[in-house]
Amino acid sequence: MTDPLRCMRELQYELKEWNEYIRDVESRISTTRMAESINGGNSFASEDDCKLKAMKEHMEQLLQMNPPALPKLILEWEEERMVMGKQYRELVTKWNEVKNKGMPGLNPQIEKAERRLHLDSIASKCQTLLEQGFVLCDQIERERKHHEQDVADFETHQQNEIQQLRGHIQRLEDKQSLRFQHAQHAKRLPKMEERLKDGNEERHRVLAAIESVQNFLLRYAAMQVEEANQVFHHAEILLTTKRETEGSITLQYRLLYDKKVYYSLSSSEKISCSFDLSKLAALQGQGRIPVFIDGEESKEAFWASQIQYFVTTRIPDAALSYEVIVA
């Protein structure tokens, strides 16, 4: 491990991938088990199969059903109307013959009277047939309208029932298709559980590697802090750790001076602390970092130090100047 920080980043990225993989597999397993519990067992599937079969048979019956047949009475009336029509036409033909040819063999005066009587008789019969025919036609028309209404009601009821039945069949077929898909997923359930087990093992392996690298970094940081504290006179670096989620550790540093936190120090104490920090930077090869001191502070306490520092003094209405005390 040449670069522990880079190794840590790679391990954390790998841990993130394994966490996403495990969540995905767990979600698939949960969905499969839930679907299995909702759909029920083989008894529910068999019951749905029976329902679907019965509905399809009923659908075949509905499609084969014929509308109500024309009532026999209408056929009889139609036949009777045709007979009456034939009789009427025969009488009209006879009436024309009598009118045109007369009645031979009779005295002309008697023949004229007899012919008139005979024509009136034929006309009366024709009129009776016409009246009976009109009544019969009205009856036929009313019955035909009743029959047409019955046919329309039958077709409407049939179409509504077919539509409803098709909806039920479609829902059952969709349910069967969904159950089939879930059954296929259930067959893969042992494989998914095995993948989940492998994923958890890999995740534990990565967590163990992360913990090892963290322990190394923590020990390395502790050694650095210990070495730095040996350089200080009054300052001290306090190292603490904070454990985050997934076992990661965050290093936290606090700067103390005579056991007091930095933000609570006085100006002179902060200056003295700055001398310790500047000395540490010089020992680490980061150059000599000068320390600036406000002229209002007592600087005699710092003259013994070998650290370069600048003293600033405020003189009203004067140009900016500085004095190098130690170079």
Image (cartoon, rainbow, N blue to C red):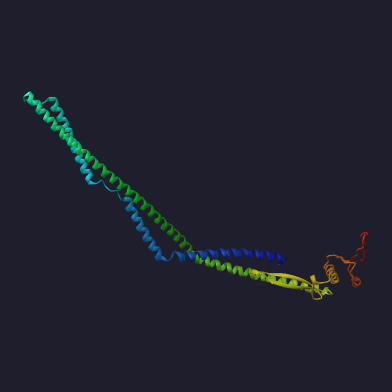
Left or right: residue 224 versus residue 15 is right
| Nearer to us in this view, 262 or 81 | 81
Left or right: residue 87 versus residue 40 is left
Q: Residue at x 64, y 64 (%)?
A: 14
| Nearer to us in this view, 294 or 20 | 294
The residue at the far bottom in this view is 259
| Residue 283 % position (x, y) | 84, 69
| Nearer to us in this view, 100 or 30 | 100
| Residue 320 % position (x, y) | 92, 60
Left or right: residue 316 versus residue 40 is right
Q: Quadrant of residue 294?
A: bottom right
| Nearer to us in this view, 236 or 150 | 150
Q: Quadrant of residue 310?
A: bottom right
Q: Residue at x 92, y 65 (%)?
A: 324
Q: Compared to 316, does 64 lie above or below?
A: above
| Residue 187 % position (x, y) | 47, 64
Q: Compared to 24, does 80 lie above or below?
A: above
Q: Residue at x 44, y 64 (%)?
A: 39
Q: On the rendered image, what quadrant is the N terminus found in?
A: bottom right
